[in-house]
Amino acid sequence: LKVINDGEVTALAAVQKLGGKGNVMGISMGSSEGGGYANAEGNLMGWINELCYVRLDLNPEAPTDPWTKGAHRGISHMYLGQRGATKLAAKVVKGLPENYRYPHPDMCTIKHEDHAQCLKLIQKAMADDAQKEEVKKLYQTVGVYLGYALAQYCEFYKIDHVMILGRVSKGDGGDIMLDAAKKVLETEFPEFAGIQFHTADDHFKAVGQCIAAAALPTLKKRKADCLESA
């Protein structure tokens, strides 16, 4: 059994779309944060890049999450998955249902459904001229999260390209988010300002990982490997 997570698939999808270029960080901003990395040759490294549990926020009052149950704070998926957007929604979205207002108990469980519905309301508000200017601030904030996260990831990975997929990156808000992330790197971390950002159309953002995963080849064991394991 071979297991590959959504972040690794994002990295492979990036390598395919970039014509084989390497040193690619793939980040899927969906239900959580999926992170993957392909080296200079465009190959996966054989380890698990579980970036959703990297600590990004060192503030002792940073939010905790239902998986670590208060044992940790400032974990990445609270900033770069849909929870990074939904925990800010009440500040900018008019008429948001009470149970979608973080930290309402419904927003502090391991279930993703309420966050997915809340994100749809954020995206709907982004399309509303009466709310758009305020909702832009939400996406700019998530972009700042992303910029600082990439600088931190660069301490451990050689990153020339980053591919951003996932439902959080859809629409005009996603473009605002990426622009904010670039600005963080340019102003705060100029040594990383050369990182090239890549994304896709909204359909590929939503299902591109599935397409890439379906295209993964079947690996056949070499005869020597079978002898060694016998």
Image (cartoon, helix red, strand yellow):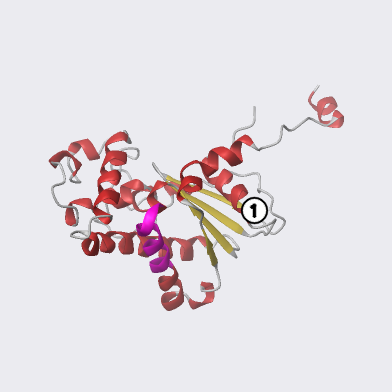
Q: Quadrant of the C terminus?
A: top right
Q: Main secondary structure of the magenta part?
A: helix
Q: Position of residue 26 (x, y in %)?
A: 54, 52
Q: Is residue 9 left or right of residue 115?
A: right
The answer to whether residue 53 is visible is yes
Q: Is residue 178 magenta?
A: yes
Name the secondary structure under disc 1: helix
The kind of residue on which mark 1 rests is Val
Residue at the (47%, 62%) spot, across then down? 150
Q: Quadrant of the N terminus?
A: top right
- The answer to whether residue 107 is above or below residue 179 is above
Q: Is residue 117 left or right of residue 13?
A: left
- The answer to whether residue 56 is above or below residue 65 is below
The answer to whether residue 69 is visible is no
Residue at the (42%, 78%) spot, across then down? 187
Q: Position of residue 193 (x, y in %)?
A: 51, 74
Q: Is residue 26 magenta?
A: no
Residue at the (60%, 57%) spot, across then down? 24
Q: Position of residue 198 (x, y in %)?
A: 53, 60
Q: Position of residue 53 (x, y in %)?
A: 43, 47
* Residue assigned mark 1: 15
Q: Is residue 174 left or right of residue 109?
A: right
Residue at the (66%, 37%) spot, across then down? 216
- The answer to whether residue 84 is above or below residue 129 is above
Residues shaded magenta: 170-181
